[in-house]
Amino acid sequence: MSENFAKVKNYYDNGCWTKKQVGDAVANGWITAGEYHEITGEDYAPTPTQLDAIQAAVERTNEELRQEGADALTLELLEGGIL
């Protein structure tokens, strides 16, 4: 049992924490995925972070620019992480 299991379970059981917050406790190493299941009754499925979502949007935008035939300099700046 993780050191913080009882604390997280208590927060969730008393309505102080949502499933997302319990999931954040897994992501931050406070509890295990198995303990998440024990607390919520559901399997732990990590959700993408905001940074992941931003990166995915940038990649889609870059691909759209390539498909539209962006000039070589723009593509070079994109691939170099400057844009």
Image (cartoon, rainbow, N blue to C red):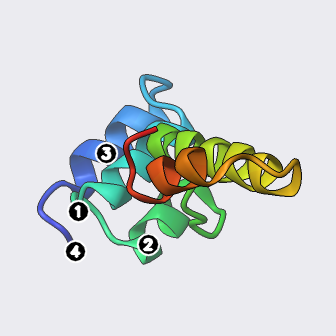
Location of mark 4 (residue): 1
Q: Secondary structure at mark 3?
A: helix
Point 22% across, 57% down: residue: 30
Marks 1/4: CA–CA distance: 12 Å
- Of 36 and 67, the residue lying toward us: 67
Q: In the image, is residue 15 above or below residue 9?
A: above
- Could you say where residue 5 lies in the image, as x and y percent from the top left? 26, 58
Q: Amino acid at mark 3?
A: Val
Please, what is the three-letter code of the amino acid marked with disc 4? Met
Task: Mark 1 or mark 4: name the one nearer the start of the chain.
Answer: 4
Closer to the camera in the image, 83 or 54: 83
Image vertical order of residue 79 relative to residue 82, above or below: below
Q: Residue at x 35, y 58 (%)?
A: 27
Q: Residues within 10 Å of mark 4 (few under 14, many from 20)?
A: few
Q: Position of residue 79 (x, y in %)?
A: 48, 59
Q: Relative to residue 47, is residue 1 drawn left or right?
A: left
Disc 1 residue type?
Answer: Gly
Q: Secondary structure at mark 2?
A: helix
Residue 16 lies, in percent from the top left, at: 42, 23
Q: What mark, if any, has residue 74 been given in the picture?
A: none
- Along the line of sight, which residue is nearer the eye, 5 or 59? 59
* Tag 2: amino acid: Ala
The image shows residue 34, relative to residue 48, as above or below, that is: below
- Name the residue that disc number 3 marks: 8
Q: Secondary structure at mark 4?
A: loop
Q: Position of residue 17 (x, y in %)?
A: 44, 30
- Earlier along the polypeptide chain: callout 3 or callout 4? 4
- Dot 1 or dot 3, earlier in sequence: 3
The Cα–Cα distance between marks 1 and 2, rounded to whole angstroms, is: 9 Å
